[in-house]
Amino acid sequence: MFQNPFSFEGRIRRTEFGITFILYWIASVLLNVFVESAPFIVIVVVIPLSWLCLAQGAKRCHDLGNSGWYQLIPFYFLWLIFADSVPGSNEYGPNPKGIS
């Protein structure tokens, strides 16, 4: 879990995507608390966090057999959280569950 989290290649399971999603929202809440006292830190933290979320979202889209651009569809993240992966390998790599 969390191997090459900033890469846009490969596939990930729902669990890894869900954990990333939760950690992103926790970090967002914490950043909102500290935004007034240290605005520069917010910029330094938001850029890598956004990259991480986009990369993980793209890999989850790949797990469903779709392009990473699908994550830009409004509310598609709900499908990413709840949909099961495509069984077996696809053009984006082997199934992360190890199921053929």
Image (cartoon, rainbow, N blue to C red):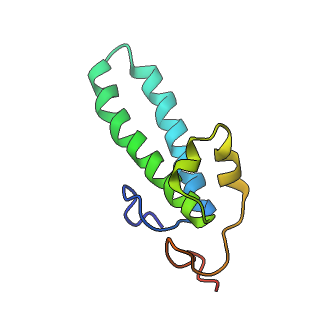
| Residue 87 percent location from the top left of the image | 67, 77
As rendered, which of 24 and 66 lies closer to the eye? 66
Query: Residue 31 sits in which quadrant?
Result: top left
As rendered, which of 39 and 6 lies closer to the eye? 6
How many numbered badges does the structure rendering display?
Answer: 0
Q: Residue at x 47, y 46 (%)?
A: 53
Q: Residue at x 46, y 68 (%)?
A: 10
Q: Is residue 54 above or below residue 13?
A: above
Q: Is residue 21 above or below residue 94?
A: above
| Residue 27 percent location from the top left of the image | 46, 36
Instruction: Give left or right: position of 41 versus 100.
Output: left
Q: Residue at x 63, y 81 (%)?
A: 88
Residue that extends furthest to the top in the rendered view of this protein: 36
As rendered, which of 73 and 7 lies closer to the eye? 73
Q: Residue at x 60, y 53 (%)?
A: 18
Instruction: Give left or right: position of 38 versus 67.
Output: left
| Residue 38 percent location from the top left of the image | 30, 19
Q: Is residue 27 above or below residue 14?
A: above
| Residue 80 percent location from the top left of the image | 65, 53
Which quadrant, please, contains the C terminus?
bottom right
